Image (cartoon, helix red, strand yellow):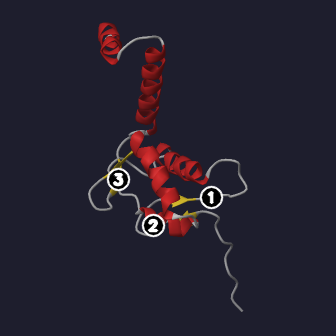
Amino acid sequence: MTSTPDVDQTHAVPGAALSLPPVSRAKPTALHEQVAAEIRRAIAEGEAKPGQRIPQARDLAAELGVNPNTVLRALRMLRDEGLIEMGRGRSIKVAGTQERSLVLTRTAELLAFARKQGYERDELIAMLSSLA
C-alpha cells in the first residue's frame, strides 16, 4: 500500500515558476484583490522577476478556481500599478518591482491631493523639478 504525500495548499501554475495560494471566499477581501495581492507578494519576494512571463488569465483562473474576469480585473490593477505589462496576444510579463509600484501609487496619491488643493499637473511637475 502506497501512502500519498500531504497536499500542499499552494497551487503551482502550469508553465511558470509562480505559485499562488487558493483564494478564499470566506475572506472579506474581494477575490480580485486577493489574486492581485498574491501576485504582488510573488513579485516582492522575487518569485516572479522583471521580464518573467506570468500565465494567462484563464490558466490562473482555472488553477485558483475563480472566473477569468476576476483574474483579468486583478491583472489590470497590477498593470495600472506598473507591476506587469500586458502585451499583444495574451503575453503577460512582470514589468517592475514592488518598490516601483509603491512609488507609482504614492505619485498618484500626490497628484490627487494636489488637485484637491487647486494645483494643476504642470504646477506639480514644476514643484517636483525644483526639488530635484
Instruction: Judge whether 87 appears above or below 119 on screen.
Output: below
Q: Distance between the residues labelled 3 and 1?
A: 22 Å
At mark 1, the secondary structure is loop
Q: Residues within 10 Å of mark 2 (few under 14, many from 20)?
A: some
Q: Residue at x 34, y 9 (%)?
A: 127
Q: Earlier in the sequence, mark 1 or mark 2?
A: 1
Residue 29 falls left or right of residue 66: right
Residue at label 1?
23
Q: How far apart are marks 1 and 2 (CA)?
A: 15 Å
Disc number for residue 58 = 2
Q: How crowded is mark 3: few (under 14 residues within 10 Å), some or many (20 or more)?
A: many
Q: Which of 103 and 49 is in front in this view?
A: 103
Disc number for residue 106 = none
- Can you see residue 47? no
Percent across and percent down for residue 4 are: 68, 81
Instruction: Judge whether 66 appears above or below 41 on screen.
Output: below
